[in-house]
Amino acid sequence: MIADLGFGLGVISYSLLLLLLFTVRKAGLVKYLLILATAGTAVWCLLHINFLFGPVEIKNLFLWDAIKQSIWLIFLLACIKDDFRSLKDVLMRPFSIVMLSVPVASIILPFFVPIDVSWQFLALTIISLEVLVILELLYRQAGENKWAYKPLVLFLGATNLFEFVTFANATMVGGLEVTYIAARGYVYTGLLPFLVLAIRRIKHWGVDIFISRDIVLHSSLLMVAGIYLFIMAMIGYFVKYVGGEWGGTIQIILIVLSTALLMTLFLSNSLRVKIRVFITKHFFVNQFDYRIEWLKLTDALSSNEANISQVYENALNGWIQAIEYDSGYLLKKEGHNLTPKAQINHPELTSREIQLLNELAVYCQQKDWVIDIEELRYQPFIYEGLKLNHALLNECSFQIVLPIYKAEALWGLAIMNGDRSVRKLNWELRDYLTAVTAQISSYVFHHEASKEVAENAQFAAFNRMSAFVLHDLKNVLAQIDLILANAEQHKDNPEFIDDTFETLTHTKARMDKMLRQLTDKKEAQRSNEKLCDVSVSIQSVIDKKCAGNLPIPSLIVIDEKQLVIDEEKFCNVMYHLISNAQQATDDEGKVEISIDMSVDQRFLIVTIKDSGEGMSPDFIEHRLFKPFDTTKGNAGMGIGAYDAKNFVERLGGSINVQSEEQKGSVFTLNFPAE
């Protein structure tokens, strides 16, 4: 009875595999031989059921085993090479003839010549050994495909090793052990999953069967139950072995606990879900080829768009392509509202849909969860804490709501709909969408940040330009103040009047230039460079701009060379530095400007030295050249020294400062002479 149960399970298992193989339409020699071997094994199991056909006679057992083993041998011989076109090509090889000689003889000879059972046992032992030899050969030449062939080796290796032990033992003792024969059905049935796994892995066989995850789940639960029963049997065997007996109390306790455990396994939904996810993750091929999908996503986001609207559209297109949907909407949360940013093949959202999305946005702020509208409609308990009017779900035109987060705060929602295909949101799709969202979000946030940086840079440039214009305006005002201060004394002097008109003409030109800068919203370009005598320019600054303040600066020219510079800008820089020296020095002090060449004649050196109040090292390091930092209160802009440093450095020179408090300061400007 126990043997019949094992062979009955074998008939059912191999028949199911046979049905799966019949569903494969792709032709192939190995496929047909596999079907033949599977069918042969199913029939072999069927013929061993005593309940249907009575006790098995020894001569029939030899015949059936020889036929079954011969079919598996031919199948293995066909697997050795991939280029067999027909069964004849397989059978006509010398190696195949040698390997098949023993099984063929075992099948044919008993019909013509009486053969002792010990020789028949030996023949079946040799056939099992041949299968093991071919398996080793096949595995060794598999190369990089050893991983694929390993389940096949485990299936045929374990079954034929069992057969080898069975018939080798029968050869030595002169008879078959009944326990070995009774176990054969269970052995072949238990090892069948390895064959199924091999069929899935070895692609060139042309067999691509699919096993439902639900079937694997239930099989796994049955396997757990079987393991439990095995453990219980081992405990019982141990108790019997040591000479004890099962007590009634122990039996009741174990029966109750085992029943509770099995009921938990079969009825616990959360446990079943965890087992399903574990099986799917570790035993099934992924739904996506992530290498290809990632390349497609990278290509979709590779464009360098300056238009932020196009960036939003590219991002939405990336989400839609990732799950092969047709349409979608991208909405950004601005304040308490969701603002549409991009739309692809999707109708305008209705007021009811916007109401639903606002409610979902509140939920997504609390929980990072991709929402499947279909799942929400029929399994609302999955979305714990989400309370909404379910009538809204029947009116929405989208299927997936994907939350997007920035610094753990909800940035917006991407909604998608598939007209041609609808994907069920399982664990893999959720993980995949999470990874895709992280990539696309960084793409969107990067461009948003770039846009903000560009806008801030525009404002910074305009503010800087405005500051320089105001600084120049202050210098113009100083020139006008100088005219007014001397007007009463020199108004009857024709030379003073000529200088006044010349200054006003120059002032008007500078104000026109400043007005153009403000109108064009950009700084003036260095387009007025020419050969200039530095000493002449500095003397002009002293006479026209600095002569009205004390102490009067003195100019000492030791050596000089003409420079190619923007003379107007150079004069502004000199005026600022000389004016600062005058303001920092008492009327009785002195301000000296000297011009000299460096020892190697590569630099023209302008030195501005005063005997004023000086500066601290900390002030020079941290504040002197910092824009908009002034010690003059509202009277200064705080950009004169900064402007001077930038001007000198743009020419390729440098500016050095030495100062001691209450003793004075020395500014040294090095201009490249070439």
Image: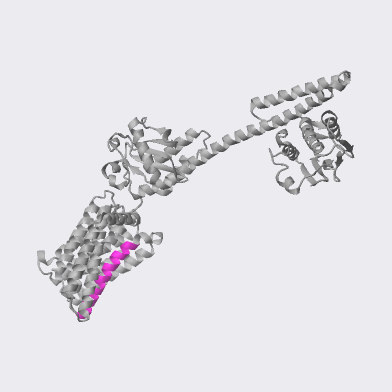
Q: Note whether 264 is above or below 472 in the view shown.
A: below
Kindly identify the residue that appears in the image at 25 percent across and 55 percent down. 215
Quarter of the figure that contains the C terminus: top right
Foreground residue, 629 or 254?
Answer: 629
| Residue 152 covered by magenta stretch | yes
Foreground residue, 16 or 506?
Answer: 506
Foreground residue, 140 or 107?
Answer: 140
Residue 81: percent from the left, percent from the top? 35, 59
Q: Note whether 108 is above or below 197 in the view shown.
A: below
Q: Which region is colored magenta?
A: 150-173
Q: Is residue 408 visible?
A: yes
Quarter of the figure that contains the N terminus: bottom left
Q: Is residue 292 visible?
A: no
Residue 25: percent from the left, percent from the top? 26, 48
Q: Note whether 446 is above or below 142 in the view shown.
A: above
| Residue 530 covered by magenta stretch | no
Kindly identify the residue that appears in the image at 74 percent across and 45 percent down. 620
Residue 490: percent from the left, percent from the top? 87, 21
650 horizontally vs 13: left or right: right
Kindly identify the residue that appears in the image at 73 percent across and 33 percent down. 635
Residue 8: percent from the left, percent from the top? 16, 63
Most prominent secondary structure in the magenta stretch? helix
Q: Quadrant of residue 101?
A: bottom left
517 horizontally vs 96: left or right: right
